[in-house]
Structures are given as structure tokens and as C-alpha cells.
Image (cartoon, rainbow, N blue to C red):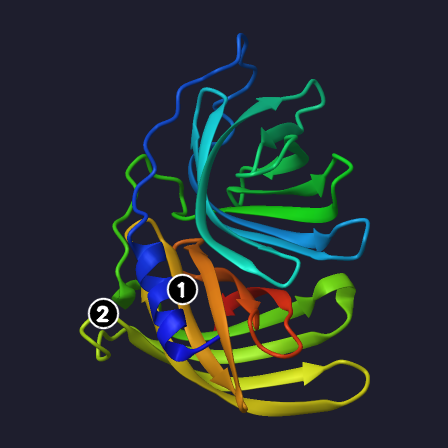
Amino acid sequence: MTVTSLRLFIIVGMGTLGLAAPSVAQAACTGGSTLNGYYGLEVNGQTPSAVGKFLNGVVYFNGSCALQANVTIGENSSVNAFANFNGTYNTNPDNTITISFTLPGASAPETYTVGYSPIFNEATGVETDSSAIASIDLKAQNYPASGNHNVYTTASLKGTWAATCTGAGGTYSELNYVTFDGSTSNYGVFGNVTGIDYSNDLAQYGNQSVAGEYGVNPIGNFGGYSVVGSTTVGFSGVIDNNLNEIQYNVSTAGSTGADVESCVAKRVR
């Protein structure tokens, strides 16, 4: 994957803007107001054939059991930039929430059961269909939750982050200790990302420098590329928790040893 194609990947993603309020397609809605507003989504797992599955992006819950999402999909060593889809959700008698949506090109819906924490305005759970073994994490983009969706820019993603990353099936783990500079110094659009990647795949432990570019679109998705050691990788993710957390996928699709990994990052400063 070349630097030119990764810049194009960012531009294409940034052109897919906005989440219109979805309509409710189901006859009955139970407890739809529990999840209400914009959330950052992270799904991390693998299919029964041990292919890694990773989703991240922005999900809008309309408070009436309908959702709309704009996410990146990482599966089978590839990333599909910023796919849009609709879905539904309902609160169960035990107060867990069932979420259902169908990914573009899929023949059947995916279902998830989550528990919602009003203290942190976050929902976590598991995938409950047979297509994958995966966990799901939904963090409010704004805390406390707000009815108005912020307009994000590249300057919104500024600071230093500590991210834990896992490869498909837990075959390796990493710490990305990275800084986003919040500038638009590259072509008036892209900021700079720098840092160190610490990795452990049992065969070896080591660290490599990270340097690249990134851009942010108005709904809080972001994308970019970085050179890790001598390998160029693409990444895409979402800003959430009042700018204090980010979640992203990293892909080496198109190069030797292609892989997709999932990362969750906390702000250091």
C-alpha cells in the first residue's frame, strides 16, 4: 500500500460525511431512549475460520430504536473505508440491549447484546450471531451526552496517546505510544503522527519508530498512514469520550504479511 493510495484513502473517507437521523423500521420500540446520540464503535474478534474481524466508526442512536453507522470494516487482511448502514436496537427485559445491523454485502444481520453503564455513558458486550466471536464497545463521543454533534477537525485529534493493540486471534500485542500534532501542515489538510511502536509476537519483542499523516472528518472518523520501521500501514478510527479516547484499526493490506489489528487508546496528555 503506497503513501499515495493511503492519502487517497483518507480523502475518500473524509468525503463521506454526516449521519442523517434514521427512521424506525420496526413495529415496536422498547427502551430506545437508553442509547441516544453519537457513539464511537469498536468491534474486535475473529470468524470461526480464524479470520480477524474489526469494525470502528461512528454510530448514531436516534432514541427510538433505530441506528445509523459510518464505520471502517477490517476483515480478511483488508479495510473497506467508511461504509454506511442502518440497524435497530431494543432494550430486553433484563435491561441488556440487543443491537442488529447488516453490513454492506452481507446476506444476514449481525446481532450484539450489550450492557449499558449510565455512569460512563458506555455500552460493552458480545456478538451473538454465528458469524464471528467478537466483543463490542460503544463510547459516547461527548461526555456527558449531548444532543448536538460536535463538528470535528484535524485539530480535534491533538495530543499523545497510549494504545493497546491486538492482532487476529491474539497472535501478537502492541503498545502504540503516539502523538498527533493537530496541524494541517501537509497539503493544508493532513496533520502529523509520530511515536514508537512496541510489539510482542512471542517470537520477538522490540520497538520501532512511527511517522505519518492523518486527517479527521466532521463526524469524528479519522484515517491516515504511518511508516512503522520500514513498513507503511494504513489506519482508520474514531474519536470518542470527550476527546479522551480513540479506537482504530491498522492494516498492512496490499503488502507482504498483510494483517489487520485493533487498537484502543487513552489520552496521556
Image point (58%, 65%), residue name: 263
Judged left or right of residue 238, residue 190 is left
Residue type, label 1: Gly
Residue type, label 2: Val
Up the image or down, 248 lies above or below 240; here it is below
Judged left or right of residue 149, residue 96 is right
Q: Which mark is residue 223?
A: 1
Image point (60%, 30%), residue name: 99
Q: Which residue is mark 2?
A: 189
- The mark that comes first in sequence, 2 or 1, is 2
Q: For numbered disc 1, what is the local secondary structure?
A: strand
Judged left or right of residue 35, residue 200 is right
x, y (%) of residue 101? 57, 32
Quadrant for the C terminus, please: bottom left
In the foreground, 56 or 256: 256
Up the image or down, 74 lies above or below 144; here it is below
Query: Which picture quadrant has residue 138?
Result: top right
Q: Is residue 231 visible?
A: yes
